[in-house]
Image (cartoon, helix red, strand yellow):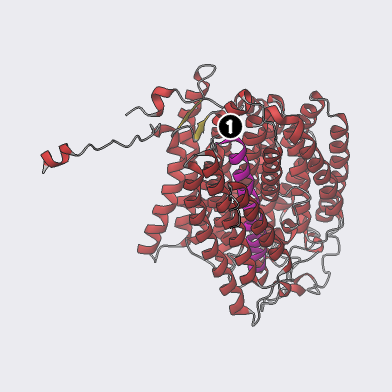
Amino acid sequence: MLAAVEVTSNWYLILSAALFAVGAMGLLIRRNPLVMFMCVELMLNAVNLSFVAFGDRLGDIAGQVSVFFVLVVAAAEVVVGLALVVAISRRRATTTADDLSVLRG
Amino acid sequence: MLSLLAQIDIEPIDTPDVDWPVLVPLLVMSVGGILMLTFASILKRLPSSVWSIATVLLSAATAITVIPLWMRVTDTANSASSTLAGSVAFDGFSLFLTVVIAFAVGLTALLSDDYLKREGLEGPELYVLLMMSGAGGIIMAFANDLIVLFLGLEILSIAVYVLAAMHVRKLQSQEAGMKYFILGAFSSAFFLYGIALIYGATGSTNLIDIKNFLSVTVLADDALLLAGFALMLVGLGFKVAAVPFHFWTPDVYQGAPTPVVAYMASGVKAAGFAAIIRVFVLTFEQYRTDWQPVIYVLAVLSLLLGSFLAIVQTDIKRMLAYSSISHAGFILVGVQAATDRGTSAVLFYLAAYAFMVIGSFGVLTVAGGKGDAAQSLEDYQGLSKRSPFLAFALMVFLFSQAGVPLTTGFFAKFGVISAAIDARSFWLGVIAMISAVVGAFLYLRVIVTMFFAGDDDHDSDDGESAGQDDIGDDADVASTDKIDVPLGAQIAIGMCLLVTVVFGIWPGPIDDLAREAIPRLVQESPAALFGN
């Protein structure tokens, strides 16, 4: 039998940092606004994972409670973001971030 | 039934004590906004001006409800307190910024009324969002807990994302909203990750608990805490538009409806700096050697890039966007000092800047004409002939932004620079002064354009300024017609003018208020914490 590796809260923290980095890179690289929203969601949920892992490590319930607040905020953000995409795509056939280049100095 | 209930041992849930009077300004603003939305959906036929007037009255009410609270705070030397289990701080600092934000909301509402009519966008939405955003700002000013701070920041920001995209028929406005949204959400995620790391390092999100923890514990490994600082600074740096987190600013300021930009430059900035001061200057005072250099670098970059890049702009809204970046640099100079003097200088700056920037964008709102088309520097040639009032007002506001004596801008700049020198940051003071000189050149250029370059009255208008506008606007920016200044804008611009000049000559009152508004972290008495 293989010795079971103990999964500590550090593993979750590293996973959360990795997810956050993936989200941040994705937001910078991808050009489709919908995918960019998904990346923002990924970043926020990576933070949620951190909150839960820290809460577990500290034996404190506040970390888990914070997750609820973050979930509500993330939902509100998506509502606004999707509304913006709809508003823009009504005026434009395609919606990629590169098309949004009227404003430049 | 009752006996059955009596048998079950019900643990009463401890609810924290609420000091309701403290929450009144916030409740006026937020409940007022919600009620307005409710009434607006029932009374559809009301003219748009009603909502503008209602917003002005409600924000005035917000500012008035602060007065008794202010008396309470300044009554005895140290009567600041915290309530709601320590998550709401009640001190002069939060009240001062509440008033600044309330004024920003009210003045923006005055400017918006005519803008909405001109652009055919009448409706209560802008005002409701404005008040929601203002309520978020007030939450940030009162926040004594990182999660509360985050919620305030999001309430503030989400409303402003929509406000930036408010002009439904203008692609530029929607593009501005989209850019602001993507980058704003990105920065919020960083801010939140910073909160999570600080929570992990200190075991609490409450600022009082964090400070108490840090004062009795020496962290063996403070990497987590420092990473938290860095991430929080990225998030807040975006909100206050400090270099290198400023990329969105020129685009969003150019594309968003001009009254909204006035609010973004005043209210959003004030709330962002409220968070920076309460979190860094107050809570992490002990770790100042770790965060001060970072703020120092941000301040230097914002000061220099802001004023130098502003010079090459030809669009006046973009120009003011870069100038607002350099103003963020000036305010950071005061933050970097990390002293009481620096904090009161920052408060004075925020109050003074709110009035001059709302005034500036107020003039731009009126002078921009239909579709906000006339925003290039050439469109402002000879503004003094078309509307002496607007030209004079913009001149005063730009002088004030440049820091010319006899305006509030002078004392604001003087305050932050002397606070920096007091804190022995001589080079930062020197860089701030260089930036002020470069800025003065920039503002003078606009003033000269307005007053002296308009001699060729019959200059045929070739519509080059309106070239970008993709909607069928009548590219006829009549350059010789007199501009009618609507009443709302007259009141708003006049008020900003009055504040900028009167308190520029006699800065004592605001200065005294700013000195009394030093933030404090006060532990709630244990009796009040769960005082059922």
Q: Between A86 and B113, which is closer to the camera in this rendering?
A: A86
Residue in the picture at 53% in, 51% down:
B155
Q: Between B467 and A32, which is closer to the camera in this rendering?
A: A32
Residue that mark 1 sits on? B210
Percent across and percent down for residue B245 are 74, 52
Residue in the picture at 46% in, 40% down:
B61
Percent across and percent down for residue B378 are 82, 63
Q: Is residue B261 magenta?
A: no
Up-down relation of residue B372 to residue B53 (above or below): below
Q: Is residue A71 left or right of residue B260?
A: left
Up-down relation of residue A105 to residue B230 (above or below): below
Question: Where, by quadrant of the figure, is residue B430 drawn?
Answer: top right
Question: Where, by quadrant of the figure, is residue B214 drawn?
Answer: top right
Percent across and percent down for residue A10 are 62, 47
Residue in the picture at 71% in, 25% down:
B341
Chain of the residue under label 1? B
Residue in the picture at 64% in, 59% down:
A19
Q: Quadrant of the C terminus of chain B?
A: top left
| Boundaries of the magenta span | B174-203
Q: Between B104 and A50, which is closer to the camera in this rendering?
A: A50
Q: Is residue B89 left or right of residue B380?
A: left
Percent across and percent down for residue B390 are 70, 52
Query: In the structure shown, which secondary structural element does the residue marked by tag 1 occupy?
Result: helix
